[in-house]
Image: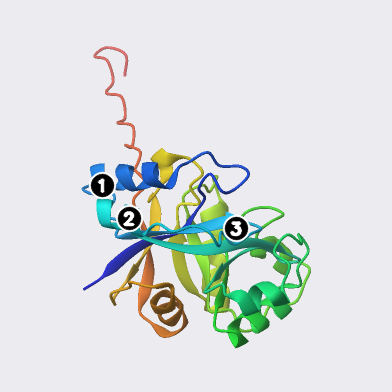
Amino acid sequence: MATIIDLHSHSEASDDSRAPVEAYLNWIKLRRAERPIDGIVLTEHRQFNRSGDYRELEDKYGVLVLRASEIETDYGHMLVFGVNDEILRRFDFTDVRLPAQIVIDGVAAMGGVVVPCHPGRPTVGLHEHYEHKPPLHNIVAVEMLNGGSRKGEDERSRELVARHGYRAIGGSDSHMVSLIGLCATSFSSQIGTIEDLVRELRSGDYQPVDFRPRRAVPRRAEPVPGQE
């Protein structure tokens, strides 16, 4: 049974978001027909929200809530899944110039996984850094679909995936309740814990999914008789 998870979202624990977790879950419950999300991952900026306990909300809304982090490195922004005490002792998530290769390798050795996010975004995305730096090693996947992408950003992400053969995920990058679940990742296996998620990201079967509404293509105007 497939599991669809929005792997990139920000709650009010992040400094640039005012979205309560319960509001996210209620939105998902009310709109499952258009965004069939089974769970979300809270990837708070430059921190790991140790105190977050969402078990009661999970039971109330029937939506899985996992915790991760979004960090800033010398190759752009990256999501860290499977954060544990050992990782937090080794790396200062408040450092906005963390060495990407050291973080990728170190987190993997300590049981987690690092995924570069919105790689097509200027300045903070992997695509731009690859223009003047050597490619990183041991990348498991990158976020190919991002719900907050502007024109051309997802296209650059697709180009990066095709060029380097990376696996791909999707996430909404939501900072507002109404944006949760716009992009997500569909896993062929069932996921119930962060350990499950890390395992599947490393070696499982998954793909990004896009629930953003498609804009209707304007119809060509019919000529007015006598004005052809």
Callout 3, which amino acid?
Gly
Q: Amino acid at mark 2?
A: Glu
Residue drawn at x 52%, y 50% is 10
Q: What kind of element bears circle 1?
A: helix
| Residue picked out by circle 1 | 29
**Residue 123: percent from left, percent from top:** 72, 54
Q: Residues within 10 Å of mark 2 (few under 14, many from 20)?
A: few
Mark 3–mark 1 distance (CA, rounded to whole Å) = 31 Å
Reading the chain from its start, which is encountered first: label 3 or label 1?
Answer: 1
Residue 31 visible within the image: no
| Residue appearing at x 78%, y 63% in the figure | 97
| Helix, strand or loop for disc 3 | loop
Earlier in the chain: of badge 1 and badge 2, it is 1
Left or right of 54? Residue 37 is left
Q: How many marks?
A: 3
Q: Nearer the viewer, mark 3 or mark 1?
A: 1
* Mark identifier at residue 120: 3
Label 2 residue SS: helix
**CA–CA distance in space, label 1 to label 2:** 15 Å
Query: Which color scheme is applied?
Result: rainbow
Q: Position of residue 202 (x, y in %)?
A: 47, 82
- Disc 2: which residue: 56
Image quadrant where residue 177 sits: top left
Residue found at the very far bottom of the displayed protein: 109
Mark toward the start of the polypeptide (2 vs 3): 2
Q: Work out whether residue 78 or residue 27 is closer to the camera in this orientation and state it.
A: 27
| Amino acid type of the residue that numbered disc 1 sits on in the rendered structure | Lys
